[in-house]
Image: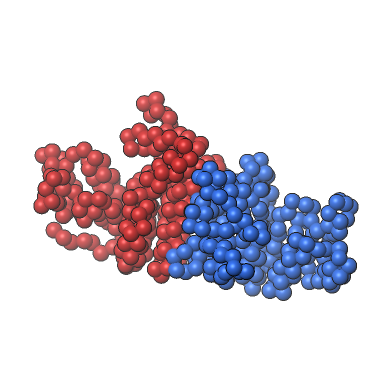
Chain colours: A blue, B red
Amino acid sequence: MDTHTSSDLTVLKVGGAVVENQESLAQLIRDFAAIPGPKVLVHGGGRSATALASQLGIETKMVEGRRITDDEMLRVVTMVYGGLVNKNIVAQLQAAGINALGLTGADMDIIRSHRRPLKNGIDYGWVGDVDCADGPRLATLLQQGITPVIAPLTHDGQGHLLNTNADTMAQTVACALAPQFSVSLRFAFEKRGVMGNPDDPSSFIPHITEQDFQQLRAQGIVSGGMLPKLENAFQAIHQGVSEVLIGETLITA
Amino acid sequence: MDTHTSSDLTVLKVGGAVVENQESLAQLIRDFAAIPGPKVLVHGGGRSATALASQLGIETKMVEGRRITDDEMLRVVTMVYGGLVNKNIVAQLQAAGINALGLTGADMDIIRSHRRPLKNGIDYGWVGDVDCADGPRLATLLQQGITPVIAPLTHDGQGHLLNTNADTMAQTVACALAPQFSVSLRFAFEKRGVMGNPDDPSSFIPHITEQDFQQLRAQGIVSGGMLPKLENAFQAIHQGVSEVLIGETLITA
């Protein structure tokens, strides 16, 4: 089953590893520029943030893959995600003929979030859980030929920036645009895609429907960190996204 | 003569000293939010850039008030101007009910520049001399109720960000919008305005026409750093800007 639905809009999420290396960034710019039709790029940048924090003598503390973001770390991620990574991508996309616009959630109020409450007694600090994205505003930009490039920062509407998970932001943006576009949500991935057996390249699974997913889960073929990724993918599909790609694995209803 | 022309659009330029201190930033947000009609904010941030550079062990070299911008310093100003300062202003304007959008010249290709050629044998590095601003694009944003907040960074269209003088960017933006708006270009200033005698507060000059300027210059009443500021102000007026304010001193044709 290799029947990609035709999609009007692509939302691509790339992790920090891709955008922090000059060569892989140049490749990303080429690949992203080649995607036809309107598109949105959502990027990470965690490794650069950790590196800058270290240079400044600020310790990076992670809990379950999430960065504890105190006042000093918020300054670091605001500089790295909103400035360094975002603006370099924008300038390079411009050079590739893409009219890019760098955004955080605060810009034009496109993505709001609220500060994460204490969780199991853990204070994540200035970390935001996303509330909503302004789909019509983003659609207006896209219709004007502008390509949003979104950094993993949001705001609470009360003057605070919040460090926010880029996967969640990509999903929220894709869902917010689903009423106006047929949306393909793509997660760049270090592996080829969803694998039946992580150690066996031939176990790559090209297409997963919701029915397939129930079976794969019941059989224990997908497990661990892939489970929440697939759950989120189907959640996006329930919210109107046409298809999700995790690497090259196509996920549809 | 205290006859401010009625103006449809305000372009306000504020220096780093204002935006880098929490109290003066809060005051700026209140003052700027209170300006009626469409508006644009152009900000600096040099002192924060110097502070971050120092923390990172990078020496700041200035020549005639301009920062020598090598690769490392470009990273610093991209982080500080495009990220830290810009995004904090945006988030706080959002909290004040202003639908702000943070921009560098690379975003939506709004301001292009070219790398400054060697000047008296001095290589300024990644410093841009402004070529043009996209007035129609900025006007479209303003007509949509969006308030651009512009960081002192531009791009060359070939993938390079360039460190750019904020005064020049404000003037370029004001001129680019003059065909569509009656523009008031305001430079926040540490003194009350243009002074006949810097040491005598009563020597404040409330209004200067071009004719006045010729006399003040001939008499040696304005001199030094104020001369280029006033020359630039009249240049903006020749390019269609309705009025310029340096502090509270009104400058008109």
Left or right position of A251 against B101: right
Farthest top residue? B121
Q: Residue at x 44, y 55 (%)?
A: B86
Q: Residue at x 76, y 56 (%)?
A: A247
Q: Nearer the viewer, residue A176 or B200?
A: B200
Q: Residue at x 63, y 59 (%)?
A: A63
* Residue B131 in sight here: no
Q: Residue at x 66, y 53 (%)?
A: A15
Q: In the image, residue A233 lies at what x, y percent? A: 73, 67
Q: Nearer the viewer, residue B231 or B50?
A: B50
Q: In the image, residue B102 lies at what x, y percent? A: 46, 57
Q: In the image, residue B217 lies at what x, y percent? A: 15, 40
From the viewer's perspective, is residue A105 above or below residue A98? below
Q: In the image, residue B98 lies at what x, y percent? A: 41, 67
Displayed quadrant of residue A237: bottom right
| Total number of numbered discs in the rendering | 0
From the viewer's perspective, is residue A74 above or below residue B168? below
* Residue A12 in sight here: yes
Q: Nearer the viewer, residue B67 or B177?
A: B67
From the viewer's perspective, is residue B163 above or below residue A40? above
Q: Quadrant of the N terminus of chain B?
A: bottom left
